[in-house]
Image (tube, grey):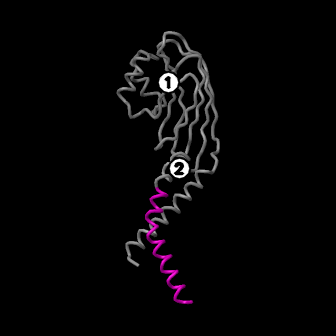
Amino acid sequence: MKRWIIFLGRGGTVLITICLALLLASLIPPVQLVTFGSGGVIHAKSFVTHFVRVLTPQQRLQVTITANGTLNVYLVEVSPDPIYDWMAGVPWDVTRLEEFLEANPDLIGWQGEMREGKIEYIPSKVTNATLILSNSGSDYITWDFEGSIASVVAPGTKIRNLAQWTIPIGFVLALPWLTQSWKEKTARQGRNL
């Protein structure tokens, strides 16, 4: 059997095995570390921040938000201090916040508009995380949220997406080796009879 077929075949089976092990690890349920909640009122053209904490890639942040109006929600990968420094004496101004976010788009880990909804976030690196709820409308909005931080062994969504691509690639790499091995085995059995 040619060496390159053996090399690719064994590589493919190793790839399949690793992906299957990761899939099993992603099925381990997360352990809840911290729960928190808050609520209040956001005045027109204003925002509030809630400092979550330092997150690692092995931690999942989930936040459920309920409001009586549409909020712009941001999860930024920085502590609140740089945001307040940017405000330069004009605290809680939505315009200044939007200027900060436009100047630092790489700090935005998640963003969206919502009245009710759920955010799930797993960082790709160790990072600070600050939740920002922004009201760009002309009326005040009452809001409430509950959140939790859980420890995960392997992020399920990312692992499943990875496995969707790598397991078929592993099968394609292993198939010539497996068929060649099967042919050689049946030929040997035919000679022994």
Position in image of residue 154 (x %, y %):
55, 50
92 displayed left or right of 66: left
Q: Nearer the viewer, residue 122 or 190?
A: 190
Q: Are marks 2 and 1 in contact (CB under 8 Å)?
A: no
Q: Nearer the viewer, residue 101 or 16?
A: 16
Q: Is residue 168 magenta?
A: yes
Q: Which region is colored magenta?
A: 166-193
Q: Which residue is mark 1?
A: 113
Q: Judge the density around disc 2: few (<14), some (14-19), many (≥20) Cα neighbours within 10 Å.
A: some
Q: Residue at x 49, y 65 (%)?
A: 14
Position in image of residue 174 (x %, y %):
46, 67
Q: Secondary structure at mark 2?
A: helix
Count of numbered badges drawn on the protein: 2
Looking at marks 2 and 1 on the same chain, the residue that comes earlier in the sequence is marked by: 1
Q: Is residue 89 above or below residue 161?
A: above
The dominant secondary structure in magenta is helix
Which label sits on residue 13?
A: none
Which label sits on residue 160?
A: 2
The amino acid on which the numbered mark 1 sits, given as a three-letter code, is Glu
Residue 151: name its quadrant. top right
| Quadrant, the N terminus | bottom left
| Quadrant, the C terminus | bottom right
Q: Nearer the viewer, residue 183 or 127?
A: 183
Q: Residue furthest bottom?
A: 192
Q: Is residue 148 magenta?
A: no
